[in-house]
Image (cartoon, coloured by chain):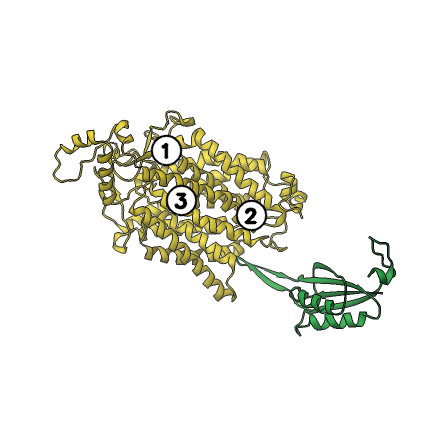
Amino acid sequence: MTLHSRLAGGLATAGLAAFAALPAWAQGAASAPAASTTPALIKAPTPEQALAMINKGDTTWMLISSALVLMMSVPALALFYGGLVRTKNMLSVLMQVLMIVSVASLVWVGWGYSLAFTSGGDNHFVGGLGKAFLRGVDATTVAATFSNNVYIPEYAYIVFQMTFACITPALIVGAFAERIKFTPLILFVVAWLTLVYFPIAHCVWYWAGPDYLPDAPTDGGYLWALGALDFAGGTVVHINAGIAGLVGCLIVGPRVGYKAEPMPPHSLTMTMIGASLLWVGWFGFNAGSNLEANGVTGVAFINTFVATAAAAVAWAVIEQVRHGKPSLLGAASGAVAGLVAITPASGYAHPGTAIILGFVTSGVCFFFVTTVKNKLGYDDSLDVFGVHCIGGIVGALGTAIVADPALGGQGFFDYTQFPAVAGSYDMGAQLVTQARAVLLTLAWSGAVSAILFSILKFTTGLRPVRDVELEGLDINEHGERAYNI
Amino acid sequence: MKLVIAIIKPFKLDEVREALSTLGVQGMTVTEVKGFGRQKGQTEIYRGAEYSTNMVPKIKVEVACATDLAPRVVEAIGHAANTGAIGDGKIFVLDIDQAVRIRTGETDETAL
């Protein structure tokens, strides 16, 4: 799901697969000016030709990855967040995550996929409505990958991207957990997906595909065309949701009793289960974002493993030094911060640089979650900003460094050529591009979220009344309790 | 008849129960409680948010026994629950006016 990338090896494999799958045209193509034994690639294949360029292994991997990413929302994120709130609000968090995932998937097939992943023509900020309600999509339509002449079924691509649209708004609820009205939250999610998530996803991830871009070099999202690298969603998912969470918690206001009374997590056991399932699911998120099952998928997979481990170790060590005791919540927070940071870099980094990225991220996130939050006094209940936005920024900027082939990174591919060739990498310029992508996401998501939350605050209201909040959202908003003993 | 109420450290419950069993005590009631005494609370840190909990988790044990057994019950609990550290808890002894075994209707010492 990134922009420029991928291996020449992948290209060759693609050609072979296509050759085996469709001998008739492959022979025709090979009789072109073929100077080598490698079958020639087809530029701008017809839909029928593209359909024959689907590989069962890729398709299988994408469907498994999609299921893994759904598991990150329910139950992983729900349990991770749920364990961190007080008993009286446990069920509200579970319900919020479950409903956001369900609503987001409906919005996605309604207009989300079309707005995010169809061409906007001269508009490079959002797509069109040509595929609204999945019009024109069927079992024979395809979606491009990062290799010339390799395709996956469009439904597999839609469902994979759908899981991202489901988890991103669910991340936001942690920022104002324990004090939000349910229905306005769901209204916010629908509006935020439409006005923020789909446009940002389009800006970062939409492009014509490697076989069509050479003939239509401007057919890509704004940030994609700039050359911003975001392998699996550092900007689109984590910075996007993180800044929306910060804005939300500022507009909603702190919990009653914040800083005056203890608000310890009610079950770190649940949080541990959730964090662990997040880690497992994240292999689908990051390695699945390669859209194929090949060597780079392996790169993303191992980076997702080791950056996370490094960040968990780093957070525990920092706590050991600062407080004399390493806490489970700290290690789990570090693991999530590491997962967030490696997300944009997962398919570009070397495992060695991924580990360093994990170490650095834990230090920065620890500082924000403990020191900055306390200094500024905002009540980001579950540290959505401190972990997801800050971790996402560290990862997005760090991607410029770790992607450098001089450091063992993957670099990027120039897809305006056919077939794609490796681009010449300039770390400094890439860092500037990454910063622009971060700033645009912060500005757009921050501003639109502020408007949306403000409108809801003065119409439906965002907060339950004080007594409801004190008694807990579970019994008052949902009419049930998480635990009946 | 006496009611012996002991507030003890939670991890001492098993030793207290064993000590009372050897005395022939037939039953006891146990409750998880929180409170404070001379023992200072513990400090908990969650992602940098420090909570000093002045209410410390304890176990409350209630034992009803014959008056002449009460001193030995007190001694057994005091011995079993003792760690020598602050926060070991306290023992209170109260008079019981009446006792009834619900199933049979037996009263007083035969009901214990």
Tag 2: amino acid: Gly
Q: What element does badge 1 sit on?
A: helix
Q: How far apart are marks 1 and 2 (CA)?
A: 33 Å
Q: Mark 3 lies on which chain?
A: A
Residue bearing mark 1: A117
- Residue at horizontal 39 percent and vertical 25 percent from the top: A135
Q: Quadrant of the N terminus of chain A?
A: top left
Q: What element does badge 3 sit on?
A: helix
- Residue at horizontal 66 percent and vertical 73 percent from the top: B83
- State the mark number for residue A260: none
- Residue at horizontal 48 percent and vertical 31 percent from the top: A106
Q: Can residue A336 be seen in this view?
A: yes
Relative vertical location of residue A343 with respect to residue A186 in this rendering, above or below: below
Q: How far apart are marks 2 and 3 (CA)?
A: 22 Å
Residue bearing mark 3: A285
Query: Where residue B8 sits in the image (x, y, percent)?
Result: 70, 66
Residue bearing mark 2: A82
Which chain shows up in green?
A: B
- Residue at horizontal 31 percent and vertical 54 percent from the top: A350
Callout count = 3
Of callouts 2 and 3, the N-terminal one:
2
Marks 1 and 3: in contact by CB < 8 Å?
no
Q: Is residue A416 visible?
A: no
Of callouts 1 and 2, the N-terminal one:
2
Q: Chain A is drawn in which colour?
A: yellow
Q: Which of A301 and A449 is in front in this view?
A: A301
Q: Residue furthest front?
A: B104
Of badges 1 and 2, the one in the foreground is: 2
Q: What element does badge 2 sit on?
A: helix
Q: Mark 1 lies on which chain?
A: A
